Image (spheres, helix red, strand yellow):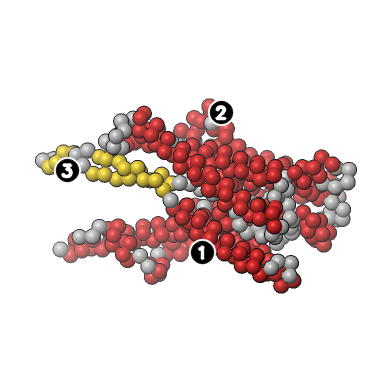
Amino acid sequence: MASAAEQLAANMSLSAFKTADELKKRIWFTLAALLVYRLGTYIPLPGIDPEALKSVFSQQQSGIVGMFNMFAGGAVGRMAIFALNIMPYITASIVIQLLTSVVPRLEQLKKDGEAGRKTINQYTRYGTVLLATVQGYGIAVGLEGAEGVVVDPGTFFRISAVITLVGGTVFLMWLGEQITARGVGNGISLIIFAGIVAELPSALAGTLELGRQGALSTFIILALMIMVVAVIAFIVFMERAQRRLLVQYPKRQVGNKMTSGDSSHLPLKLNTAGVIPPIFASSLLLMPVTLANFSSGEGNDIMATIAATLGRGQPAYMAMYAAGIIFFCFFYTSIVFNPNDTADNLKRQGGFIPGIRPGQRTAEHIDRVLTRLTVVGALYLTLVCLLPEFLINAYSVPFYFGGTSLLIVVSVTMDTVGQVQGHLFAHQYEGLIKKSKLGGKRR
């Protein structure tokens, strides 16, 4: 007889959506939440001259502010209430996770299970409000420094701008948590995903328009399209790649019967950290230069130097970006996967890796394998994220849908599809259980 899992895999099809009412509700809730987010990216800050802002932004969009605008779904270019997007929350998460390795109190909370996790999340929210306030004030001051952008500069504008921007970030933080709890997929990742995808049509249209005007040759445009397809295939392959460690279980006596020894695999992903390292590295690079790009001008040489040094395609920017990705690959992997806990769980269940003594030796072996995988994963992420930067720097290609954005889109899509399949499996499994119970009653 086929197992329940095999039956589910055989019967999995789009027709399963018809009876999966819970999944349909979750999908509709997710789409409605993302629609609310997109509408918010078109509501401008009070007291802003749109035409003057458009003129100032056109001078900065080729730099790191353009990258920030890509993550924010165009909200920065329109200086909307969601201009800060969810980046302060991501930065606060970085800081809190770093502190959990240093502060004993936070380290203990991390070990306290669900209650400790809720407390750490609360600290992250407080940090988000603090960072959003600092960044919001920096943007308000920077906008006042740009000629003609603010209609009535002064204290009232700064206060209203800070309150609006902080409120927008807090709302997105809450919206992301609601999507995670009541929708499908990770809410924070989906918000960033929606912003990037929303800017794709205009970026593609702009590239084709440059080709029509003769600024870009047809060969370069075709090469870009082929590169995108190749990078997508490469990302999918690397995200699915894993190293499987063989785990053996000894023979057991169950009643009067002796069960034969079983074997399974411990899967270790090549990229355990996922899309988090590029997002973390981007957010850390975006934070210190948010003010610099808006206020760099006459009489402000320091800001102009910072903006020029950390501009996209510059050696300092690419070096810091690569270093940030590699660091967060190892750091985040150490947080989400603990070899000692895995080895202890295997020992308690009677499992062992052939040729490796259970306990500490098993933990060391898993850690050694995971470290080698993380090295390859970090190099893969760095290559994918820096590829567009090299193209921009070497050939002045105005093509920004690549690297980090492409990685986020592919990874979030794969994760969301996986969760949808998980809901469908759960729904069909419940149906099989009900059928088996009804069949047992008839007999």
Give the secondary structure at mark 1. helix
In three-dimensional space, the C-alpha distance between marks 3 and 1, rounded to whole angstroms, equals: 48 Å
Q: Position of residue 312 (x, y in %)?
A: 70, 50
Mark 3: secondary structure: strand
Instruction: Give the CA separation, mark 3 to mark 2.
Output: 48 Å
**In the rendered structure, which amino acid carries the disc numbered 3?**
Thr
Q: Where in the figure is residue 64, as x and y percent of width and height?
A: 71, 50
Name the residue at 27% across, 40% down.
248
- Residue 425 sits in which quadrant? bottom left
Quadrant that contains the C terminus = bottom left
Other-residue count near label 1 (Cα within 10 Å), few / some / many at <14 / 14–19 / ≥20: few
Residue 61, quarter of the rendered image: bottom right
Q: CA distance from mark 1 to mark 2?
A: 41 Å
> Which circle marks residue 259 in the picture?
3
Please name the amino acid that badge 1 sits on: Trp
Q: Is residue 426 visible?
A: yes
Q: Residue at label 2? A: 103
Which tag is nearer the camera, tag 3 or tag 2? 3
